[in-house]
Structure formats: C-alpha cells, structure tokens
C-alpha cells in the first residue's frame, strides 16, 4: 500500500475564539510537526459564543500577516475563517472575503438566523421538526457557493446531510469535504461515496490547542479504512 504524508493543516483555532494557544504557538507547532502550511481559521462573527469580529478580527488578521512574513521560507501561514451557516443559503461571510486564503464553512450550534426569511425557510430542519438530510445539504451548499468556500467542515455534525448529493455538488463547485480529526463525522461508506462522486477530501485537525496542531490520527484511520488517500488534497504520496 502506498504511504502518504499530510503537509498542511487548514483547520486550527486559538485563544482568539475558544482555543487555548496563540497563533504563533500554532505556527511553531506546525513547523515542529513538519508541516508546510498552517491556517488559523477562527469562527466567523455570526457565532454567538466563539465568533471573532470587529477589532478583534482585525488584530488576528494583522498578527497572521506578521507571522507570514516572519516565518516565510519555513512554513506558509494562511489567513482562514470558519464561517457559520446562518440559514438556508446564508452565512456570516465578511465583505472582504478575498482577503482570506482559506474559507471553511459549516453548520454550528449557537448561531442566530441572519434574518427571519432565511430562518423560516430552513426552520423545520434546524429545529429537527422535519429533519431532511437532502434539504440540509442544499442549504449548506447554497451558503458555501455564495461565499466561495474552499472547504465544508465536519459534514453531518449537529445536522445530518445527504453526503452523496453534497459530494456531487462539491465536485462541481470545487469545494472539498473535511474528514475532521477531532471527531470523525463520516462513515466509511460515506467517505467512499465522496470518492465515487469524484469529490476531493481534506483532513483537518480542528485543533483547539497547539499540541493538537497536525494531529491527524483519527481522520487518517478513517481514510485508511475507506482506502481514500488518493482523494485527500492535503496529502502527498511518498
């Protein structure tokens, strides 16, 4: 069997949201683990508990720009953001979306609706009155397309989605589906369905401490079991 090396971690958090370490500590941890790229991708401003917004978000972005210059030639430091789905087709995407290197989007709890119309369209699924995985996938995909997301984080977490349909659409949109190494949310069969659709995968640590940056163990085991390494876009064959 071929061996693969994961060279980038695009999904990490710091004390700017609900993590424990600093951006610098995440960067140095990534270097220690032999990674070539690291993104700090804090929750977007719509999250009531952990969202990074306003001057705080500006400070984070400035710090990442500074770290990128400081560590140039040693590791690529990327500005990321993990947006929140805030209704059918709606997210908390900032107006300066093009300033970010990596845009992740996912469904999270503790996110108020962007407006009453968006909420009413999707409320049956969100409140689990009529939880429709296909409709859930449509709502997330619509939001991902609108913000030109690169990655959909932890599909199936908190909200069940139609994975084969999502994978087909993501392939067409050029969006990757994450195998989250903090909590694997995809079954072996679902990972294979993603591959069968020709959709790319990405493994993210979803680290909330510097010690977990580059910790891909759980996701790697899931990808191994599904024999799906050739679809993992942040992995390179050795």
Image: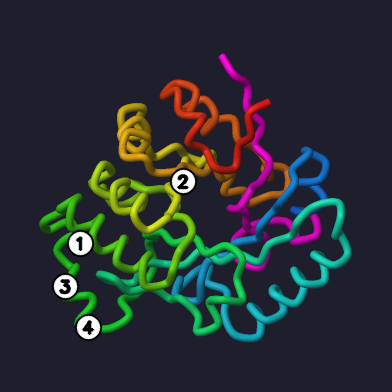
Q: Which residue is mark 1?
A: 127
Find the distance from the CA under tag 1 to the CA under tag 4.
14 Å
Q: Residue at x 29, y 71 (%)?
A: 89
Residue span colored magenta: 1-25
* Other-residue count near label 3 (Cα within 10 Å), few / some / many at <14 / 14–19 / ≥20: some
Spatial CA span between label 3 and label 2: 26 Å
Expressed as whole percent of the image width and height from the top left, the position of residue 62 reads: 75, 77
Q: CA distance from mark 2 to mark 4?
A: 30 Å
Q: Is residue 185 above or below residue 49?
A: above
Q: Secondary structure at mark 4?
A: helix
Q: Is residue 45 above or below residue 191?
A: below
Secondary structure state at the residue bearing disc 3:
helix
For residue 185, side relative to residue 77 (left or right): left
User: Rounded to the nearest whole Å, what is the CA distance between mark 3 and mark 4?
Assistant: 9 Å
Residues marked 3 and 1 touching at CB (< 8 Å):
no
The residue at 18%/52% (across/down) is: 134
Task: Name the residue carrying label 4.
Answer: 116
Q: Which mark is residue 121?
A: 3
């Amino acid at each position: 069997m071929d061996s693969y090396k994961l060279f980038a971690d695009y999904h990490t958090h710091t004390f700017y949201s609900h993590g424990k370490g600093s951006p610098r500590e995440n960067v140095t941890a990534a270097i220690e683990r032999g990674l070539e790229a690291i993104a700090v991708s804090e929750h977007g401003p719509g999250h009531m508990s952990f969202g990074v917004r306003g001057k705080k978000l500006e400070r984070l972005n400035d710090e990442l720009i500074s770290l990128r210059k400081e560590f140039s030639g040693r590791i690529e430091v990327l500005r990321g953001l993990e947006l929140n789905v805030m209704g059918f087709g709606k997210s908390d995407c900032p107006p300066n979306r093009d300033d970010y290197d990596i845009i992740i989007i996912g469904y999270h709890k503790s996110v108020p609706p962007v407006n009453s119309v968006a909420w009413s369209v999707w409320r049956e699924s969100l409140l689990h009155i009529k939880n429709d995985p296909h409709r859930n996938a449509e709502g997330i995909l619509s939001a991902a397309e609108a913000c030109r997301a690169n990655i959909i984080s932890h599909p199936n977490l908190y909200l069940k989605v139609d994975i084969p349909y999502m994978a087909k659409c993501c392939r067409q949109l050029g969006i990757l589906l994450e195998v989250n190494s903090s909590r694997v949310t995809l079954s072996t069969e679902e990972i294979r369905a993603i591959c069968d659709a020709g959709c790319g995968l990405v493994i993210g640590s979803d680290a909330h401490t510097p010690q977990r940056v580059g910790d891909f163990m759980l996701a790697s085991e899931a990808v191994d079991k599904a024999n799906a390494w050739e679809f993992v876009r942040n992995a390179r064959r050795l």
